[in-house]
Image (cartoon, rainbow, N blue to C red):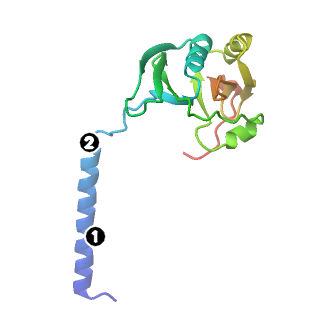
Amino acid sequence: MLSKLKKNTLVAALVGSTFITLATSERLQSQPDPLGHMQAEHVMVATPDYDGTIAWYRENLGFRIKHEWIVPEFPDLQLAYLEKNDFIVEIVASPNTAEMSRLDDFAERLRRPGIGHFAFLVNDVDAVTAALEAKGVEVVVPPTSFPDSGRRLSFIEDNNGYMIEFLEELPLEERVPYTGGE
């Protein structure tokens, strides 16, 4: 059994911590969330082939060169921002960049550590994939619907072997209802 002094101390501590918690909570709520406005800006592609990679993204995906530069501290690097629809692919090229080992097995590619691909939302995955295939772009996964995710998608690979996904939302009637938690 707690003595009266210990009970009072415990109550005072609980009340004090509740006040501090409430004050801290109110202060945090009144401050804007520093991550509240966040949007994707760019992805970086490392390559040994600067010119070939720029040409591939320009010719196949319609990117334009936004900016090219060098970093004096890293004289072997060539850098460029390629832009399309406010999204940037940053090309970082060096003759010292190792070529990426290519895997034929798509499931193994998904298990490879690191960032495995980047994706673009499109209106018609089938049309985009057909247009890229007509240009000779390697299609890794043909257009396929995944009702559990509510999306139809395809994967291609760029001239370096990096995977790029194109996806569209499936109509509601083709989606499997989400059964997870909140």
Q: Position of residue 77 (x, y in %)?
A: 47, 29
Label disc, if present, on residue 99 of the rendered structure:
none
Which numbered disc flags the more N-terminal residue, 1 or 2? 1
- Which residue corresponds to the image point at 47% horizontal and 14% vertical from the top-left? 65
Label disc, if present, on residue 14 of the rendered structure:
1
* Residue 30 falls left or right of residue 125: left
* Label 2 Cα neighbours within 10 Å, binned few <14 / some 14-19 / many ≥20: few
Q: SS of the residue at dot 2? A: loop
* Residue 140 falls left or right of residue 75: right
Q: Amino acid at mark 1?
A: Leu
- Which residue corresponds to the image point at 65% horizontal and 15% vertical from the top-left? 124
Identify whether 159 is placed above or below 30.
Answer: above
Q: Which residue is mark 2?
A: 31
Quote the CA–CA distance across marks 1 and 2: 26 Å
Identify whether 140 is placed above or below 9.
Answer: above
* Residue 43 falls left or right of residue 129: left
Q: Position of residue 110 (x, y in %)?
A: 68, 39
User: In the rendered view of the protein, which quadrant contains the C terminus?
Assistant: top right
